[in-house]
Amino acid sequence: MENFNEKTVTSETLYCGKIIELRVDEVQLPDGKLAKRELVKHPGAVAVIAITDEGKLVLVEQFRKALERTIVEIPAGKIEPNEDPKQTAIRELEEETGYRANEFTYIQSFSTSPGFADEVIHLYLAKSLEKVENPAAGDEDEFINLHECTISEAEEMMNDGRIYDAKTAFAVLYVKQLTIK
Amino acid sequence: MENFNEKTVTSETLYCGKIIELRVDEVQLPDGKLAKRELVKHPGAVAVIAITDEGKLVLVEQFRKALERTIVEIPAGKIEPNEDPKQTAIRELEEETGYRANEFTYIQSFSTSPGFADEVIHLYLAKSLEKVENPAAGDEDEFINLHECTISEAEEMMNDGRIYDAKTAFAVLYVKQLTIK
């Protein structure tokens, strides 16, 4: 296996926002040449595949400014400073859906856009759900419609584009695979 | 269904790079309040689930500066100006793997990070592969190791973190599902 690491020559932070940072690095390539890398730093996020006792997938519908449209996703949210990802996942599930899970297990983590961003999503499976009487309030700039769908309804939403993001597309295949097993 | 659209009040482009742009919008929320949205513009990308006649998945290993590590991914690349996504997919498959496909079909598209980026990946399935004698050269700042793996090898790579990005995680489940059918 060849080592293709890129050595940082210079690194400049151009923007520090509330959620993301933008950095431009000059790197030395394996052949010695120089190249620029435009990099977005993100605190990381969690997402929850929550399945009700009736076998339905819990989904949230919200407007996404980056896409200028409303999409249907699994519950998710970014990790707050010093927060353990599992706690983020439990918190986001309650805030966005009003559910608490008696079974909460880690599935896997993945990078969303390795070409330019360091965002990693940690994915959890939540089962044996219970509605919380007074769920914790979510972010005040978040407006959400809640859905509970069968897997074939979720597949239909993936086909017609209402489900339109990578983590939720993965979730639909993941749940389908669980039911085949 | 409630309409939770966010109206743009102001929009400021803070960075225009080679690949991404950074924009900060002030938006009006459904309750009338104002909020900031940090948005990354990206030209969009394609990714190819390429399966050899032996049923192996074609994978590329490369260093990703954003993650500061090497990961194993399905072949992918960004869409050039005025390029049709299918042409991008055919081009990237040849540049990164040396393969041309006699069967090339569109699977679906998904947003990678709807919370802050407009990047969409268009996913294709490539079968009936043939090695090209003199494949087109790829980007000069791209250094790649090629792999061809069985599905169980790919699953193992997903479990140990060598496969670590959303599109490839989706691809592994997708191919597994194809073989179950």
Image (spheres, coloured by chain):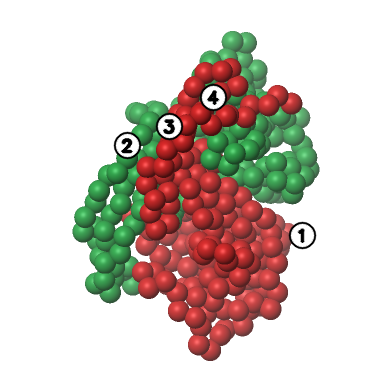
Chain colours: A red, B green
Amino acid beneath label 4? Gln
Farthest residue, direction top: B134
Q: Earlier in the sequence, mark 1 or mark 4?
A: 4
Q: Which residue is mark 2?
A: B16
Residue B113, given in percent of the width and then of the height, sits at 47, 51
- The verdict on a common chain for dots 2 and 3 is yes
Disc 3: which residue? B79
**Looking at this view, is B87 or A2 the one in front?**
A2
Using the rendered image, report if marks 1 and 4 lie on a common chain: yes
Q: Which mark is residue A105?
A: none
What SS does tag 2 mark? strand
- Measured as percent of width and height from the top left, residue B152 is found at 78, 43
- Between disc 3 and disc 4, the foreground one is 4
- Closer to the eye: label 2 or 4: 4
Closer to us: A139 or B95:
A139
Q: Residue at x 70, y 41 (%)?
A: B162
Confirm whether circles 2 and 4 share one chain. Answer: no
Pointers 1 and 2 in contact (C-beta within 8 Å): no
Q: Chain of mark 2?
A: B
Query: Are tags 3 and 4 found on a single chain?
Result: no
Mark 1 or 4: the one toward you:
4
Q: CA distance from mark 1 to mark 2?
A: 48 Å
Label number found at residue A181 = 1
User: Badge 3 local density, few (<14 within 10 Å), some, or many (20+)?
Assistant: many
Question: Eyeballing the image, is B90 above or below B107?
Answer: above
Q: Are marks 2 and 3 in contact (CB under 8 Å)?
A: no
Q: Which mark is residue A28?
A: 4
The residue that appears at 38% across and 31% down in the rendered structure is B18
Check the picture and name the quadrant holding the N terminus of chain A: top right
